[in-house]
């Protein structure tokens, strides 16, 4: 057995760093041509467990330096009296291409199914490299033609990223990176497991966050000009982004249906309790926040499948238009929770929050960060882009999200409260951004 208990905590995507591992055992090992596919069950001393996925390539005991450097070397295992070294196969270009070829050829090994989308040709001969942005998953880019995302933590249930991308691609949406193939399996209880997906690579794309942050920074570096006067004005793009998000919502509604129901305010209130329990700065807002959330839960609204964790970091501007990516939903929530129909206003609120972030983060840590004129300019930039986004959204959706004020405000508040807790944990210097918003939303 490879020393996974030592190796896993050193991986960037490993989510159990704050917990103590009790044991790691292979749940399923599937022999593939040239490598093994492993599902590992990590049990923690606190009684919980997680399932992780690793493709293991076996090499000789002297790995090349490049592989050592990436942390791809898992360690040694004794098999039948001989020692073998196991590597994370995704860092081996030929192994990554072999995995893509298994998808292209629609192969199945045991319970692991590799399948290409109908009519798609995969770039099986393209050079492959692991993408630079590695967070909770690992992506291999095939020469600007395709990107293969392998989920590292694999909870039971169909991952909404695959599910919704499949629906949107098959419906011909122009606002997603077209799905090209997938790797799926089934757990011992018969639950679906989503292991990976391949999408068309968006060439010459720019991340919405980078564009917005640049536009806001340019403006705030020259506070005597107004948002509509600077060269980097984003309003036109924000309008088109609103259209793109509304178009994705419409396709999801057409394909998967719409129901009516109430906003799940109990979940929001639980989140409020949790956030207020860990961040003392939220105490003065708790009662008012709960009242605002509960009030929004009293009316019936349209519910459908949505993105669930939309922000400017989840949209790519390509020459033909905006793409929405990463439909995984909020990573901390169980899969079934993430697949529950919700209001499109959740996604709209996520984008509106993101415009606030893009402007106010420029001022974080600056000596003049509290300067009234700068803050006024930042607000102008935010208003201008939020309005443009909502107008673009209205153009396609047929209604302006701002006309659903109470529900929209509840989603903005819910997201801002989530952000306060998120920032307190990961980026304390940024916590003032959502805190200020909580204050504004409850005034
Ligand atoms: N189809 C694509 N084309 C080009 N770049 C992409 C594509 N999909 C993702 N990316 C890049 O990879 C990053 C991470 O992708 P994402 O799907 O959000 O993965 P994760 O779930 O690991 O966060 C994105 O921010 C984007 O920069
Ligand atoms: O990593 P995910 O895409 O799942 O999202 C999480 O991390 C995001 C931070 O990167 C966080 O987003 C917050 O910061 C963004 C700027 O970095 C900003 O655009 C978002 O509006 C703000 O919410 C997101 O909330 C969190 O789920």
Image: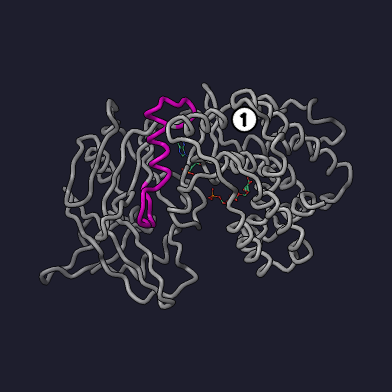
Which corner quadrant holds the N terminus? bottom left
Whether residue 110 is visible to the viewer of this picture, yes or no, is yes
What segment is highlighted magenta in the picture? 150-176
Residue 303 at x, y = what percent? 54, 41
Determine whether, in the image, residue 206 is placed left or right of residue 61. Answer: right
The structure residue drawn at horizontal position 41% and vertical position 36%, both measured from the top left corner, is 165
Mark 1 lies on a secondary structure that is helix
Nearest to the observer: residue 411 or residue 136: 411
Nearest to the observer: residue 326 or residue 302: 302
Quarter where residue 15 is shown = bottom left
Residue 300 at x, y = what percent? 61, 43
Establish if 334 lies above or below 248. below
Establish if 271 lies above or below 412. below
Residue 235 at x, y = what percent? 70, 27
Label 1: which residue? 242
Nearest to the observer: residue 211 or residue 120: 120
Whether residue 237 is visible to the viewer of this picture, yes or no, is no
Colour convention: one colour
Determine whether, in the image, residue 103 is placed left or right of residue 229. Answer: left
Establish if 107 lies above or below 439. above
Question: Any magenta on residue 16?
Answer: no
Residue 29 at x, y = what percent? 21, 59
The structure residue drawn at horizontal position 35% and vertical position 36%, both measured from the top left corner, is 142
Quarter where residue 144 is shown = top left
Question: Any magenta on residue 170?
Answer: yes
């Amino acid at each position: 057995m490879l020393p996974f208990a030592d190796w896993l905590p050193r991986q960037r995507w490993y989510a159990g760093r704050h917990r103590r591992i009790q044991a790691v055992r292979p749940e399923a090992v599937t022999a593939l041509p040239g490598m093994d596919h492993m599902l590992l069950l990590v049990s923690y001393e606190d009684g919980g467990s997680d399932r992780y996925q690793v493709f293991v390539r076996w090499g000789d005991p002297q790995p090349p330096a490049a592989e050592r450097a990436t942390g791809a070397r898992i360690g040694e295992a004794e098999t039948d009296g001989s020692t073998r070294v196991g590597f994370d196969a995704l860092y081996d270009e030929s192994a990554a291409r072999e995995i893509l070829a298994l998808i292209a050829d629609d192969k199945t090994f045991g319970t692991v199914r590799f399948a290409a989308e109908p009519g798609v040709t995969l770039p099986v001969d393209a050079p492959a490299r692991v993408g630079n942005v590695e967070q909770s998953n690992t992506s291999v880019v095939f020469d600007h033609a395709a990107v293969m995302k392998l989920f590292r933590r694999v909870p039971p249930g169909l991952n909404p990223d695959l599910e919704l991308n499949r629906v949107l691609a098959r419906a011909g949406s122009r606002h997603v990176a077209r799905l090209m193939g997938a790797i799926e399996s089934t757990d011992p209880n018969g639950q679906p497991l989503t292991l990976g997906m391949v999408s068309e690579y968006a060439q010459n794309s720019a991340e919405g966050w980078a564009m917005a942050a640049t536009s806001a920074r340019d403006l705030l570096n020259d506070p005597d000009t107004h948002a509509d006067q600077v060269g980097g004005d984003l309003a036109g793009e924000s309008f088109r982004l609103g259209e793109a998000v509304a178009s994705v919502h419409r396709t999801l509604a057409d394909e998967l249906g719409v129901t009516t129901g109430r906003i799940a305010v109990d979940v929001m209130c639980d989140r409020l309790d949790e956030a207020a329990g860990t961040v003392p700065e939220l105490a003065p807002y708790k009662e008012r926040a709960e009242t605002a959330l509960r009030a929004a839960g009293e009316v019936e609204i349209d519910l459908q499948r949505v993105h669930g964790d939309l922000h400017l970091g989840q949209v790519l501007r390509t020459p033909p238009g905006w793409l929405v990516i990463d439909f995984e939903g909020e990573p901390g929530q169980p899969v079934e929770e993430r697949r529950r129909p919700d209001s499109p206003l959740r996604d709209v609120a996520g984008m509106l929050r993101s415009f606030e972030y893009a402007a106010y983060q420029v001022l974080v840590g600056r000596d003049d960060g509290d300067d009234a004129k700068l803050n006024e300019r930042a607000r102008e930039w935010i208003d201008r882009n939020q309005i443009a986004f909502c107008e673009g959204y209205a153009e396609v959706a047929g209604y302006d999200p701002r006309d659903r004020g109470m529900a929209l405000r509840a989603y903005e508040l819910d997201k801002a409260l989530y952000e306060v807790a998120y920032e307190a944990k990961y980026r304390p210097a940024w916590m003032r951004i959502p805190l200020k918003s909580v204050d504004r939303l409850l005034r």
